Image (cartoon, rainbow, N blue to C red):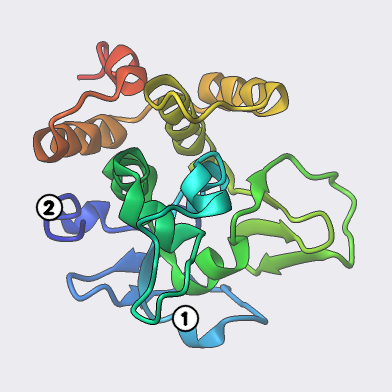
């Protein structure tokens, strides 16, 4: 992903915090960034599944129940991500889809886990985990995440892409409403369109959501 997509230093920024990174994946944290968790994972970026692998993986029977081909070297059956990777071609496509992968500060990626994106109440809560100047907020109790404004449009169009191209994935009504609102409120950027063009050349498939929105981007 680094060598193929993030080739221009100007574009080397993480999705949530806008942290700069170099060609060796090392991150320069923005001034004021703090974290009380996963402190060993702040120095490098990690590939964040915007639509979490677990959330779309659970729609596959191989993830939930296993498969006759999911037997380890000791003859024991297994299920979950490893089985879905081994037994289901569509899952493998979804998991490795570059349109869904963005660089994120490792600690933020780890804290987000597979939580759904929401708009949280503005009242501060002891259940909220924040990252200082990086405006990503995690609700530890309800297992939700509110992304910074800089990422909301990108997130919305990524969810809409998954919903459009993968039959096994469908957003909930609530998700659809939120993503539609973010898509309108935070319009596509020139960089987003350039990134999509690079991915199209690599993967060979068009993102129909971005294709329609990038028509008028110079």
Near mark 1 (Cα within 10 A), the count class, few <14, some 14-19 or many ≥20, is some
Residue 28 as seen in the image, left or right of residue 204: right
Q: Which badge, 2 or 1, comes first in the chain's sequence?
A: 2
Residues 170 and 106: in front is: 170
In the picture, residue 83 is in which quadrant?
bottom left
Q: Quadrant of the N terminus?
A: bottom left
Q: Secondary structure at mark 2?
A: loop
Separation of residues labelled 2 and 1 (CA atoms): 23 Å
The residue under label 2 is 4
Please report the residue visible at 69 percent of the width from the left and 21 percent of the height from the top.
Answer: 173
The residue under label 1 is 41
Location of residue 74 in the rendering, given as x and y in whole percent from the top left corner:
39, 82
Q: Is residue 216 above or below residue 151?
A: above
In the picture, residue 135 is in which quadrant?
bottom right
Q: Quadrant of the C terminus?
A: top left
Q: Is residue 171 above or below residue 100?
A: above
Location of residue 30 in the rendering, given as x and y in whole percent from the top left corner:
47, 70
Location of residue 213 in the rendering, given as x and y in whole percent from the top left corner:
34, 16
Tell me if residue 54 can be seen: no
Location of residue 148 in the rendering, given as x and y in whole percent from the top left corner:
59, 48
Please report the residue visible at 78 percent of the width from the left and 64 percent of the height from the top.
Answer: 140
């Amino acid at each position: 992903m680094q060598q193929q997509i993030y080739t221009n230093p100007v574009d080397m920024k993480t999705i949530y915090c806008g942290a700069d990174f170099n060609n060796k994946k090392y991150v320069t944290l923005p001034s004021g960034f703090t974290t009380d968790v996963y402190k060993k994972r702040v120095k490098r970026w990690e590939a964040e599944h915007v639509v979490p692998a677990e959330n779309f993986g659970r729609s596959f029977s191989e993830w939930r129940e296993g498969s006759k081909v999911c037997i380890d070297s000791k003859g024991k059956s297994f299920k979950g991500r490893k089985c879905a990777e081994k037994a289901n071609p569509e899952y493998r496509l979804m998991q490795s889809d570059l349109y869904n992968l963005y660089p994120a500060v490792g600690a933020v990626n780890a804290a987000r886990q597979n939580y759904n994106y929401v708009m949280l109440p503005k009242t501060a809560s002891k259940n909220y985990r924040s990252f200082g100047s990086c405006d990503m907020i995690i609700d530890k109790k309800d297992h939700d995440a509110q992304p910074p404004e800089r990422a909301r449009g990108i997130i919305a169009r990524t969810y809409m892409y998954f919903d459009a191209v993968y039959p096994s994935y469908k957003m909930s009504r609530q998700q659809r409403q939120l993503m539609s609102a973010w898509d309108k409120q935070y319009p596509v950027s020139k960089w987003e369109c350039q990134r999509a063009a690079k991915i199209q050349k690599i993967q060979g498939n068009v993102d129909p959501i971005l294709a329609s929105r990038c028509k008028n981007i110079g």
